[in-house]
Image (spheres, coloured by chain):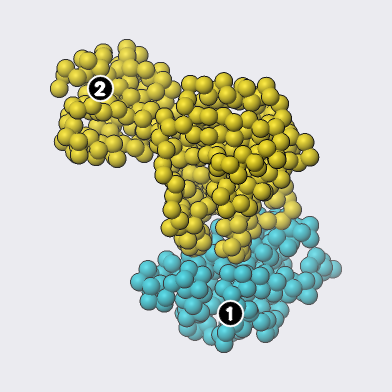
Chain colours: A cyan, B yellow
Amino acid sequence: MEHAFPITDLELESLATEAVGSVFSTMLDTNAALVSTMEVKSEDYGEGFRLPIDSDQTLIAGTVGFIGGLTGVIYIFMDLPMALKFTGRLLDLTCEEIEAEGHETVNDAIGELTNMIVGAFKNDLSNKGYECRMTIPSILRGSNYTIEPTEDALRRIFKFDCEGSSFVIDILIKEEHTI
Amino acid sequence: MRVKILTVDDSKTVRIIVKKSFKSFDCDVIEAQNGVEGLAMAAKESPDIILLDITMPVMDGVEMITKLKSDPALKAIPVIMLTAEAGRENVMKIAKIGVRDYIVKPFKEEVLVDKVSRVIDLRPAGEAEPEQKKIDDPIDILVLEDKPAIIEQIKRGFEHTPWNVHGVASTGEAIDFCQRKVPDCIIISLSVPDDAAISLFRIIRSNAKTKYVPLFGLSVKTETEEQQRAQQAGFSTIITKPIDFSELENKIGKAVNLDVSGKYFSMDDRFMTVKLPKTCTATEVNEVSNYLKTKTSEAVDAGVANVIFDTQKVDSLNTEVVKLLLQSMQLCRDLSLNYALAGNEKVVSESKKFEESKDWSFCDSIDAAKGSF
């Protein structure tokens, strides 16, 4: 018999939108609207599964894991122009200044945004009784990502729109300590 | 004096945001990327406050603060945690390890500035700084304490200084005093009845004339609840009874921004002498180090070509003192100044134990050092 996951889809959606909303309004002075939610099942993996944004272009992905009562990893995918815009707003720098600094500045800024979003998400989980610890953020750059978690992990993808562009929050979560 | 804020965070982004938040204040923001660097920076720079992340590589924030609080030279530095890790359990853990406050990311810059200004005195950049007083100038210390014996004890504790201690027993008397004359420093007993200490703190901080006067709380060592309430109200420094007057003197000197170079540096027409004290902790070594460049430049400008490093009173030649002397001697060489060392037998013998100092030669008196040039 299938074991019921302790967090409902509605709760997960609320955790994601609240975490994104809090970080975007506080750090970037903007808002992001949830436009779609994807439930990804193990049979969906394999050739052909695509993120709901243009993943042929170079994307930057911030990722932070959490370990504890619930274990998981959250990815935030966005295109480079959006990453540059957010970095500039966080640090009060122009695009030219950021480009002069190189990849590291953008990577670090997106890593920190991811850290804050996952932190807010994790803190809400803690308040629901699931104590977790976070990992250090890491950053990936590339295109056509394929992530295949273990079969028993719950995966939901949330697409947000912000100022005319889209980004994606990809949540993989399970009760056990492996993913 | 510009206050120093140490931000310890593995994220360059957060360190930049912290710097940006304080750019309109008269302060230096210094940075470290992890707990190990943070501890080293705290020992080197003696910051007025540390903003500390929790999740970091190499050494995390919890381990860093645990080490900080077990180091007598660093434990008094107030720490505010700046972290994405909140949640009930974490907050309880943070509270137990002795942080002054915590800020959960995401955070507004105004919130960061507000929380920090509750702990240290932030002065807007460009605002005229009061003229710096010297260690031997008289300063006025106002003490609000309803127990006359404690006021007498503080007066006796500072008898060897030119400082004037003015004791008052009530908030009203303290306010009257401040209206007549703005003191250089105020010590408020936290045990005065009816929360008078916190009321007076707020009145002083809201008055334009007195808002930057350094304020110390005074409390019995074991009254931790009273001390926590005072810190939450904004007292940045708490002095505990029984009072360690040497420590209090250092804290007042720093808070009032006294020029304490006279304790270590003296100059006549031929020689500059750098006299190291009996006990050379990180505080004393930092003080000497901070004045070193200015004082050697003054010596060069005055045509003095000979520098004597006097370690005759020093109890023990620890690594900090050796580093200071190495730095000082290098500076002399860079400026083409002659130098000589004077030291007692113990210092001479201890110098042989360090690779860097084993070849140093010491004179046994200042006169001998002067004669060696």
Q: Which x, y percent locates residue A94? A: 42, 75
Q: Which x, y percent locates residue B109? A: 57, 63
Q: Residues within 10 Å of mark 1 (few under 14, many from 20)?
A: many
Q: Which x, y percent locates residue B315? A: 41, 18
Which residue is depicted at the point 50% across and 67% down? A109
Which residue is depicted at the point 49% across and 50% down? B5
Residues at marks 2 and 1, CA–CA distance in whole angstroms: 66 Å
Identify the image quadrant of residue B170. Answer: top right
Please name the residue that numbered disc 1 is placed on: A167
Give, as a three-letter code, the residue at label 1.
Phe
The extreme right residue here reads A1
Which residue is depicted at the point 47% across and 27% down? B162
Image vertical order of residue B51 relative to residue B304, above or below:
below
Are dots 2 and 1 in contact, CB under 8 Å?
Answer: no
Whether residue B333 is visible, yes or no, is no
Identify the image quadrant of residue A135. Answer: bottom right
Front one among A22 and B197: B197
The extreme front residue here reads B180
Identify the image quadrant of residue A6. Answer: bottom right
